[in-house]
Amino acid sequence: MDVYDVNPSAIQTTPDDSVAVGRCHGGGHSYVNQGKTISRDGTISGTIPRSAGQYHGYNTCLGEFGGTVDADGTVYGSSYTGVSRETTWFANRNGTMLWDKRLTTTSSCWGSQKIVRLDPIEQEVHGEYIFGLAELDDYGSCNDERFLVKINKLTGDTTSWSLGPGWIDYFGVYADGVVVFQDDSAKLRYFSFDGHLQATHTLPYKNPKYSAYPSAHNMAGRVIFRVAQWQDRPADCGYNNPTGKLLAYAPSGKLFEQDNGCVSVTSVAINHLDIIAATTVGTESNSTVGRLVKFSSSGEVMQNTVLPKTSAGYTYDYSTGLYVFADTNGNFLRTSWFSYSPSQRDGAVYSLTGPTSNVELARFSSDALPVLFPRPMRSNIGMIGMTSGVLYVAATYHDNSGEREGLFSIPFAELGMDYPRGALLGVGPVAATKQYAALGDSYSSGEGVEPFYIATDTAGPPENRCHRSTKAYPRLLDLNRAIGLSLTAFRACSGATTQNVLNGGQWNEPSQVSSLTTETDVVTISIGGNDIGFESFARNCLKLGCAVGSGPYLEASLKINDISMDGLEHKLLMTYAEIRERAPHADVYVLGYPYVVPNDEGRFGQGDTPGRCSFSWNGIPAGSISPESREGATSILSQLNSKIQETVDRFGPKFHFVSPHQSFVTHELCDLATGSDYFNPPQLPEAYSLHPNSLGQAAYAGAVKDALVE
């Protein structure tokens, strides 16, 4: 679909793949373009006339001064006359005006209440209402008062609440309400859909050294800020670079702060799971390096990709723009400028002089190929429209006869609607409703299952080997939107003991329980194995043997059953009590440890040889498990799980013991019945050995999911 002679200032799509465009004005006072709704085949299904409605609005706005599009294609926008400065709000469906009104409210700015007219700034759809941000319409010293507005979609009837004086720099609708940010006070405020203030947070960056830009939010109400420091920046920042930080807030408070060093954070996108930041770094040679950094929802770096300067004859220019976007299907897209010469695409040569600017769109993944415009274009690369399978771009199209402006569509099979607007319209994954924290040791961090979050697999400084895997069960639960969990804290760390959960000290990280709040809804934890020295016990099983009554067996059993203040039971009691104290409303799911080898001697063996099991790594013997060691190993795991379950049962109905046994049965190492092991065999790095592999982490996720729905 190509529609020429359209030059929109905003593009918004609908779930049925139609698109609405709006234009508030051209240069000076040349108010030229009306709003239009366009079907997927390019047919203009409706035009909002410049003299629309009883108030004769002179120009229709969508996006630039407020406006949005509902799932059924109804356009909610504003109409403005440059002559009498009258502004109205309207609803229009396929060119038919449903209602248009001047919105009024009462203000006490003058010491007594007065009816005043509101001008729209921004609007979003949620359910039966439109929620908007408005300002007073030029009333002298009181014209900086702002209002939160709730409009009935059917009638246009309005309720409004004063937000006080001061410019509102950000407005967004999420699953539970509305969020606004006011720069001059550095206050982030959350309101319910009935206008009640739910939370206020003051950013630490208000002084002139810093500029804080709210950039994106998701359906859980998380807001991501770009923070730039230009004054007093470090001398080693070099050529024209500020320091770039990311700040993340939720209704419950600050989630994380991420210092990205001497970079400009140019754009941020967030979905229900992850965050993408686009950054640029200028160099002395006036060359700009572009980079995309992917963060987990808890702020850990998952991927860090330097973008190419040249590729296949294209030269990329990140200094003029690098943007990222999120859709409802979990994709992230980037747009960036590039040039090429001669200007040739798809076998056609265009009679243009000099290099031609173009735009590249690419998914952010290691194997994704860029999606290029099918012809040379110039575009506002910060403004695109997304819907199922189609990307819409407003651009200037070059051909042999000159230039034409238009709206162009690009097939993009995996694309969904823009996020979170599409989610507000009911498109895409179910919005997460429960804040989830994952604590524990290597069985919860995903040790041995690469790739790991970059910040947890680094020599530093500071060094960190927590090895939080992108395929660990907390991450898999977070990905399953039907469960409704939002992973706000992933703090499990390989090698963790109860001491690390309570007091930190592991890889310079704070205590794991410090990530819990009164807003936490769900906690998972596996802990206790390292307190009894399970890693050394397992190594002895392979090298020396761990039969019942052996030295390794007796040492581990003694630690499990020690009832002193230094024993496992006391350590678990202290850990669970602290979790309950910090997250009093949370359901806590304590995971047991699966049998690494079968607890049924009838299934134990290797190949066609019952009762024997040996391992090698790259041709080198790596140990073996005898029938006697199998019995000792499974006995220790049974004792450990029984002690954990007994302790969990003392904490009442909010604490749940999750046995993974049924999820792993017939998939243990040395199981005659299995064709797919759920554990890593003995290998290098040694820390990976005898840990659940990716299949095992999926089995863990399944066990927790079953427990969640019981």
Image (cartoon, rainbow, N blue to C red):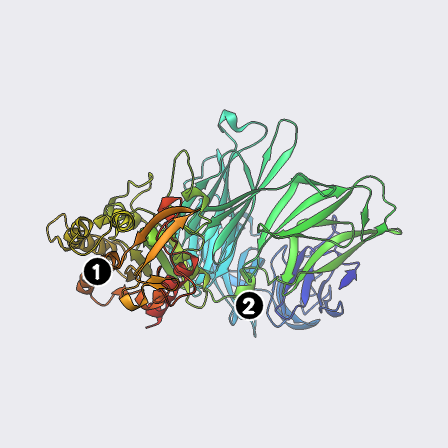
Residue at the image position 71 percent from the left and 54 percent from the top = 25
Tell me: 415 left or right of 341: left
Residue 240 shows in the view: yes
Residue 29 drawn above or below residue 1: above
Nearer to us in this view, 334 or 663: 663
Q: Position of residue 567 (x, y in %)?
A: 15, 50
Give SS at disc 2.
loop
Report the residue at 30% width, 56% height from top: 525
The image quadrant of residue 474 is: bottom left
Mark 2 — residue? 427
Residue that badge 1 annotates: 635
Q: Which mark is residue 658?
A: none
For label 2, the crowd category at 10 Å Cα-Cα, with few meaning under 14, some 14 to 19 and many 20 or more, is many
- Asked whether disc 1 touches disc 2, contact meaning CB atoms under 8 Å apart, the reply is no
Which residue is painted at 43% across and 53% down in the image? Answer: 189
Classify residue 464 as left or right of residue 106. left
Q: Is residue 81 something one can see in this rendering? A: no
At mark 1, the secondary structure is helix
Residue 507 picture location, percent across and down: 33, 39
The structure residue drawn at horizontal position 50% and vertical position 25%, both measured from the top left corner, is 235
Task: Name the residue nearer the viewer: 208 or 689.
Answer: 689
Viewer-proximal residue among 172 and 383: 383
Disc 2 marks a residue whose amino acid type is Val
Q: Amino acid at mark 1?
A: Ser
Q: CA distance from mark 1 to mark 2?
A: 50 Å
Quadrant location of the C terminus in the rendered image: bottom left
Q: Is residue 302 above or below residue 193?
A: above
Residue 650 in the image: state x and y as whole percent: 17, 63
- The residue carrying pointer 1 sits among few (fewer than 14), some (14 to 19) or many (20 or more) residues within 10 Å by Cα, namely some
The one of 237 and 229 positioned closer to us in this rendering: 237
